[in-house]
Image (cartoon, grey):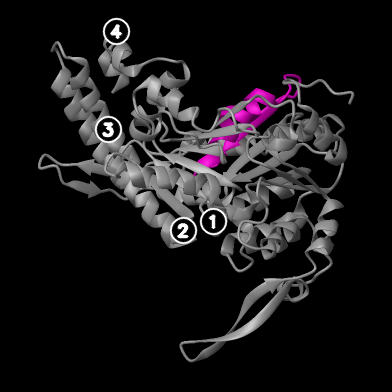
């Protein structure tokens, strides 16, 4: 392909580009960790170089949309492409309004607007996106497109109406079918109403699902009992999509790292600011020990995770977005998943939520309070029971000596401070018996101690020993 890449593509990424770059609508059904974001950025640049577009609207969930702005576009967009990239925020200011206005300047830049999908449930977000698309020759892309799988959701309707106004349309997801094949309808309908050949969701459902009547609360409801003609549906998708799994990508690195940003709620922000002041006051002008500093860090870290331990050792729940981010991430992930959390309080909450959503048999836990016999049984269940999809534990207990190669996705709901435990916990999935590339996903609350902990671990820094060698205030 005669194109100057900023970062060299892997073989599967190059194939995806060759098959899709000039198509008006296309679906990148690429498993998490295979680099679908880079494919879209290169696709945008190619169309811009050919004079086909001068703008791109990228829509993504809250947990990843900032990554497009801070990481994906700066990393992969070729240097010769002059561009103006703006991140949408619900709040406004004179500076932000000026940024927005620059998106409508008449110049030779590629104008890129990155929005969170939740904005399309609001009149303000939809109006701005409409104005942007109508002002340019635009490529419109939905990252993690399962966020528009519900045909009756307000944001799905808004995005589907907006779609035809864009010259090019793309959807990206690693798991297009999270609950049922019917999830595909709205995603494909955004690309083009005629791709699947159905004018309504109900016609599509009738073709591919067996329905039965059930009585609920005195009224009769139609529910899906099973599916049919799935080979036909699969063949229909091949015309406008590219599907790749990590196991098919022989040239990928053995480990892939991804971050999901989790914004603090207003309640968390208030508690965090107060705790930060207390922590700084506690160490100001004093010679402090490593355990003392780590205690201050832990208090701040717990708040980013959504809880706070009081002086009497009771734990108070704080309204947060971390659990919903976990459930959204799992919706986008296929296969078995290891979930590591630093605090027992979080492990118990996670297990409870997973049982509620996926059933009793779907999850096993692993931490200090669980006896050794049950722990061993839980490992065996996770490795061998096809109905057991999630292993939830803390690295302090589960990070050493056990084999969890049934999973090739590992989520760090929260990180600890010990480098050795992080590295050991990573290797529970990445060891002999693992036949696939392993993807590691870190949940990060931006501009908090959460972020600093993760950066230190990535740089192979043991926080407990390093923190006293720096200005302590910098960490807090």
Query: SS of the residue at dot 2?
Result: helix
Check if mark 1's residue and mark 2's residue have beta carbons within 8 Å: yes
Residue 312 position within the rendered picture, expressed as x and y whole percent measured from the top left: 10, 42
How many C-alpha atoms fall within 10 Å of the one at disc 3: few (<14), some, or many (≥20)?
many
Query: Considering the image in quadrants, where does the C terminus appear?
Result: top left
User: Residue 361 bears which disc, if any?
Assistant: 2
**Residue at the (60%, 34%) spot, across then down:** 68
Mark 4, Cα crowd under 10 Å, few <14 / some 14-19 / many 20+, is few
Q: Which residue is mark 3?
A: 300
Q: Is residue 463 above or below residue 69?
A: above
Front position in the image: 434 or 182: 434
Q: Is residue 105 visible?
A: no
Real-space Cα distance between discs 1 and 2? 6 Å
Give the mark nearest the N terminus, 1 or 3.
3
Query: What residue range appears in magenta?
Result: 62-89
Left or right of residue 208, residue 445 in this image: left
Location of mark 4 (residue)? 469
**Quadrant in the picture for residue 181:** bottom right
| C-alpha gap between disc 1 and disc 3 | 37 Å
Residue ranking furthest to the right: 2
User: Which corner quadrant of the image does residue 66 belong to?
Assistant: top right
Badge 4 marks a residue whose secondary structure is helix
Q: Which badge, 4 or 2, comes first in the chain's sequence?
A: 2
At 81% from the left and 55% from the top, the residue drawn is: 237
Where does label 1 land, which residue? 387
Q: Which residue is pictured at 60% across the width and 50% down the height?
A: 128
Q: Earlier in the sequence, mark 4 or mark 3?
A: 3
Q: Are marks 4 and 2 in contact (CB under 8 Å)?
A: no
Q: CA distance from mark 4 to mark 2?
A: 47 Å
Image coords of residue 53 (percent x, y): 80, 38
| Mark 4 or 1, closer to the camera | 1
């Amino acid at each position: 392909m005669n194109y100057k890449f900023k970062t060299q593509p892997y073989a599967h990424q190059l194939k995806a580009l060759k098959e899709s770059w000039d198509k008006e609508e296309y679906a990148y059904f690429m498993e998490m960790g295979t680099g679908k974001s880079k494919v879209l950025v290169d696709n945008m640049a190619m169309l811009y170089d050919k004079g086909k577009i001068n703008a791109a609207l990228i829509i993504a969930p809250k947990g990843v949309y900032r990554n497009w702005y801070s990481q994906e576009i700066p990393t992969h967009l070729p240097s010769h492409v002059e561009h103006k990239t703006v991140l949408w925020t619900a709040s406004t200011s004179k500076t932000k309004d000026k940024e927005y206005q620059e998106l409508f300047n008449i110049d030779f830049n590629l104008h890129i607007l990155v929005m969170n999908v939740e904005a399309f449930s609001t009149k303000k977000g939809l109006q701005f996106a409409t104005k942007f698309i109508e002002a340019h020759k635009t490529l419109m892309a939905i990252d993690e497109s399962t966020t528009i799988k519900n045909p009756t959701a307000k944001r799905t309707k808004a995005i589907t109406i907006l779609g035809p106004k864009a010259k090019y349309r793309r959807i990206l997801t690693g798991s297009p079918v999270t609950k049922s094949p019917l999830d595909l309808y709205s995603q494909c309908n955004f690309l083009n109403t005629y791709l699947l050949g159905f004018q309504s969701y109900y016609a599509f459902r009738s073709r591919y699902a067996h329905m039965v009547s059930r009585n609920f609360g005195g009224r009769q409801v139609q529910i899906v009992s099973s599916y049919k003609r799935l080979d036909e549906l699969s063949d229909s998708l091949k015309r406008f999509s590219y599907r790749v799994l990590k196991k098919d990508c022989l040239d990928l690195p053995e480990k892939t790292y991804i971050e999901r940003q989790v914004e603090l709620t207003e309640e968390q922000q208030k508690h965090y600011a107060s705790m930060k002041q207390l922590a700084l006051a506690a160490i100001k002008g004093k010679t402090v020990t490593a355990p003392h500093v780590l205690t201050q860090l832990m208090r701040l870290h717990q708040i980013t995770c959504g809880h706070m331990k009081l002086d009497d050792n009771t734990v108070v729940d704080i309204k947060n977005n971390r659990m919903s981010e976990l459930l959204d991430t799992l919706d986008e992930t296929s296969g078995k998943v290891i979930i590591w959390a630093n605090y027992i309080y979080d492990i118990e909450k996670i297990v409870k939520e997973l049982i509620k959503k996926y059933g009793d048999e779907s999850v096993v836990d692993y931490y200090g309070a669980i006896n050794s016999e049950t722990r061993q049984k839980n490992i065996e269940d996770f490795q061998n029971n096809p109905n057991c999809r999630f292993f939830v534990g803390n690295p302090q207990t589960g990070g050493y000596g056990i084999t969890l190669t049934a999973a090739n996705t590992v989520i760090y709901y929260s990180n600890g401070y010990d480098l050795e435990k992080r590295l050991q916990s990573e290797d529970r999935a990445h060891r002999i018996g693992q036949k696939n590339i392993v993807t590691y996903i870190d949940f990060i609350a931006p501009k908090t101690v959460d972020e600093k902990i993760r950066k230190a671990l990535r740089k192979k820094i043991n926080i407990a020993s390093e923190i006293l060698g720096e200005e302590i205030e910098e960490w807090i």
